[in-house]
Image (spheres, rainbow, N blue to C red):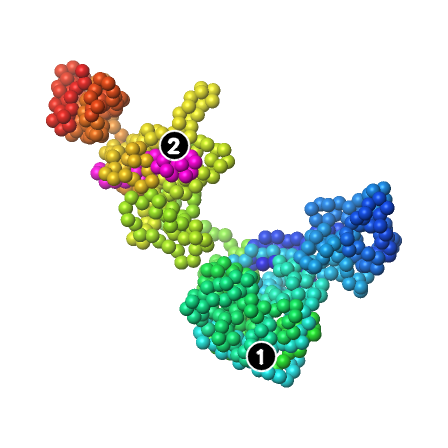
Amino acid sequence: MKISLNWLNDYLTEKIDNDKLVENYNLKSQEVEGLYPLVEASKLTIGYVRTCQAHENADKLSVCQVDVGEKTLQIICGAPNVDKGQKVIVALPGAVLPGNFKIKKAKIRGVESNGMICSLSEIGVADFDKKETGIYVLDGDAEIGKDPLKYMGLDDTVLELDLTANRPDLLSMRGVAYDVKAMFDVDIKFNKPEVKREKAEEEINIFTETKDASVYYGQIIKDIKIKESPYWLKSRLLASGIRPVNNVVDITNYVMLEYSQPLHAFDFAKINSNKIIVRKAYKNESIITLDNIKRKLLESDIVITDGEKPIALAGVMGGEETEVSDSTKAILLESAVFDPISVRKTSKRLALKSESSSRFEKGLNYELTLEALNRACELLVKLADARIVGEPSFFNNAKKIKQQFTLNLEKLNTVTGYNFDKELVKNILRRLDFDYKLKDNEFIVNVPSRRVNFESYQDVIEEIVRIHGYDKIPITLPTTPTLGKLTEKQQFKRDLRNYFTGLGFFETNTYTLTNKEKATKYDNSQKSLVKIMNPITTDREYLQHSLIPSLIDVLAYNEARKINDVFLFEIGKSYTKENEIELISGLLHGRYNYSLWQKELNYADFYLAKGIIESLFKNLKIYDYKFKVPEKELVNLHPGISTEIYIEDEKIGWLGKIHPEEEKNLEIKDIFAFELEIDKVFESHNKANRNFQEIVKFPSVSRDIAIVVNKEIPATELIETINNISNNSLKSIEVFDVYEGDKLSNDKKSIALTLVFENKEKTLETNDVEKMLKRIIKALNEEHNATLRQ
């Protein structure tokens, strides 16, 4: 919300220092995003062009003699519209214009120039008058030698607030004035609009057929003259972030900013009916809106009709058919209250967000609907020479909501930890303009309708505390019966983070919301989708099933910026309608642990990813894990370079290379990824024996064997068989070689294993080891038809 401080000071009986205003807003109300002058320019004055002659050395330049009050300056000007007899904005030598543009005396084509005649864009307010074609020519009553910014109302300062959702009252200048009154305990004054209405020449009847339109006033206004708005009105709109258009549009915008009540003007001659009906749209109904786009309506949309067809989308945008133009002579001015949820749904669906719709969405003060209309009528009479014809037609079905809350003084002090007394609370409620009755130690507080969204006495406490000052509330530490520490699950996730960052991975934190395609991209089974009700965009419409698509987006972002070695991981959740599953996902691409001086090139591959997962399990004391060939191809993974991961015969994740087609689409090769279910890994980790073990005093014995088996038999099955028949002396099994070649038949392969034996009680003898080897080879032969390679 941008606030014109000149406008705000019109309501206050005493001026507030700007720095104190910023300080108090930051401490007691809303965060201040900025405080800045509307026009950042210095040494400007109003000049009068006495003579204007062509430059002798340049066809498009003029030599002007400009009276600036105390003296006459010669200024070279290149604007096509400069002429004698004009009153203009002059930047004197030494002036600084927006963009740190400094004005100096200079010679232009051999002729001296002492300043610059300015256009609006050169002083930073191009939107002040869109009809400008060169320098800006001031009105005839401008006083020579005076400040043009003050004359035009541009000598203003803008206070920009970042409003929270619970303060829609600050979307109006009157609401801001009430807030300043409470913070600084100053008086404010508002003038009640005065409207002289003529006898009605014709009437218009207004009805509603929907409960989503609670209040509607329509006023016929005739003999309107469409023209430029006065300087003061244009400057205040500009300070508030709204571009001036013409007097009628500007007045409706001005009243919206003043009262937070949106207004809409229909060209009365184009309505072609003596009645207005507010209703829900019919099935397959449509309207061409002011932006010349045909909009298909839903039956949930509120429309304003001429009794037959829609002429406006309630609270969102008017219809092109009844648009006010330069030839308009009579209008029907609308001031209404519509259902916030309905307006929000329509504006979001049609992507028609505006200052008006945002105010409807947050809720309006129905008590000001008629007063805002009257204020607009008052201004139209003054600025558009209009006649107000008859009383407004209306319906008013608003249910008066009594916001009355009982606040016990003891409760207030218990909640805040501060000793508020009755006089202090009474003073604060007075400053807030909250009516109250005091009974014993209880305040019965009536919150005015301008402060919507109060739900309980807690909201009243918050108001009292913020006006008194949050900084005055004592700081206390919460009392707790236990020492603060991480839970086992939290510590486990921290250990996971430390493990991967220690290996050179970077942790990401991506969006949980995605589109439908990405949400299901790595689903290997049917899963339900969770769709949110009001997505910001269609790309953020569904909750994710896998983190991998988001990690691939991060990879693509880095690749586009020539960062080719990318190792990422993320801890997040997979969402379905039935449950939420916490995941840790990773992505590997490019060189790993690259050393320039050692000239070692270790590129990410399947075995690097597999080794990282195996090392993780060993760190977590999880040994009963397996990598299994999937029974069916994993979705969007390479069919020959992917595996499923099991712990104790329960699937806990997968690992593999991204499918070649996907890599082709991304134009990135050799992407490897993994995804594990954290809860299942955590459960296995908790089961693991993490006790200290005595160091074995006796030496271990290792033996290498090469086993010939059919190609389709994985090494994990051989290792499982060996573990099943071995005694406690077998310490570890490692695969160190796989061979396929001329010395073996086409359907065979050789797998070389290192077996390490160890006994805690004695030194193993050769005979003991040989006996165990014979048992192992026999079991492999019986289970897998394996033979010892000679």
Quick one: 778 or 605, which is closer to the camera?
605
Q: Residue at x 44, y 74 (%)?
A: 211
Residue 332, given in percent of the width and then of the height, sits at 59, 75
Q: From this view, report whether residue 257 is shown above or below residue 577.
A: below
- The image quadrant that residue 522 belongs to is top left
Q: Residue at x 56, y 67 (%)?
A: 320
Quick one: 445 or 38, which is closer to the camera?
38
Q: From this view, report whether residue 710 is shown above or below residue 132.
A: above
Residue 716: in magenta span: no
Quick one: 471 or 743, which is closer to the camera?
743
In this rendering, position of residue 692 left or right of residue 226: left
Q: Nearer the viewer, mark 2 or mark 1?
A: 2
Label 1: element kind = strand
Of the 4 image quadrants, the one containing the N terminus is bottom right
Q: Badge 2: how crowded within 10 Å, few (<14), some, or many (20+)?
A: some
Q: Where residue 656 is drawn, which disc sits there? A: none
**In this picture, which residue range is highlighted in magenta?**
648-676
Of the 4 image quadrants, the one containing the C terminus is top left
Residues under numbered marks 2 and 1 in contact, where contact means CB atoms less than 8 Å apart: no
Q: Where residue 670 is drawn, which disc sits there? A: 2
In this rendering, position of residue 297 left or right of residue 470: left
Residue carrying label 1: 392
Three-letter amino acid code at disc 1? Pro
State the CA–CA distance, disc 2 to disc 1: 72 Å
Residue 659: in magenta span: yes
Residue 362, given in percent of the width and then of the height, sits at 50, 64
Whichever of callouts 2 and 1 sits on the residue coming sooner in the sequence is 1
Is residue 497 at all visible to an observer of this figure?
Answer: no
Q: Residue at x 50, y 36 (%)?
A: 561
Quick one: 419 or 271, which is closer to the camera?
271
Residue 349, given in percent of the width and then of the height, sits at 46, 60
